[in-house]
Image (spheres, rainbow, N blue to C red):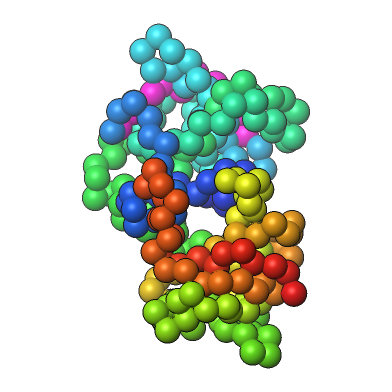
Amino acid sequence: MRITLLILSITLLMSCESKKKEYAPLSTDMAQNEVVVNEVQQTGDYTYVLVQKSNQEFWLAVSKTDVKVGETLYFTEAMEMNDFESKELNRVFDRIFFVDQVSKEPIDAETKKAAVIAKKQEGMQKLLDSIKISPVAGGHSIGDLYDNAKKYNEQTVKVRGQVVKVNLDIMDRNWVHLVDGTKGEDRSDLTFTTKDVVQVGDTVTFEGVLAIDREFGAGYVYPLIVENATVK
């Protein structure tokens, strides 16, 4: 399980382009951070690293990697979590940063962009290869909705898929991402707002109203979303 999938399950997905992706990133105070490793704790899937920057110490969590005390690491964007509990370590971190990419060499912009794209494509391809869900009678595939968004805009649509992400009670609604193994416009998941509660891993059918370029303020824009959905 990669760091991106963990972040998906506990908070809003990070994005690199405001007004193009769903969520804006929480960046650290510099374009690139240089830190020194003071302590390393390994678990099955993740590496927890106590690092120092100037006179400040803080914890990072990254996908399992070989890191040694005394090494210098570089990272750019990070997602801060407070009171995060690691069950494998049996401890609660008052403050920890989940880092999508660390490097032992300075990270230039092009290297970072290529690495992020490659990781996203690899993870999504594995997901798509494992999930193949046919539409219900009278329903649509996610790929069909992306490819024909203008045709279905403001219409009631029905979609069957597997839940890969849930964010509860944000703006008085639940936010659910489904995949069905299809994609369109380089997107494989579709977001639904709903009052119903579902779990990651569930296979469900949602019915709701499709909207394109839906803006929720503060730079949060959904190119495609199904609103006021209910489980059928």
The front one of 209 and 198 is 209
Question: Residue at image x 56%, y 72%?
Answer: 209
Question: Residue at image x 42%, y 68%?
Answer: 212
The front one of 45 and 83 is 83
List the single residue furthest toward the bottom: 137
Taking 93 as reference, is 125 above or below it? below
Q: Which residues are magenta?
A: 32-42
Question: Residue at image x 57%, y 46%?
Answer: 171
Which image quadrant is residue 136 in?
bottom right
The front one of 219 and 100 is 219
Number of residue marks: 0
| Residue 26 x, y percent position in the rendering | 42, 36
Decide if residue 86 is on the left or right side of residue 148: right
Which image quadrant is residue 165 in?
bottom right
Q: Is residue 197 visible?
A: yes
| Residue 77 x, y percent position in the rendering | 39, 38
| Residue 131 x, y percent position in the rendering | 63, 74
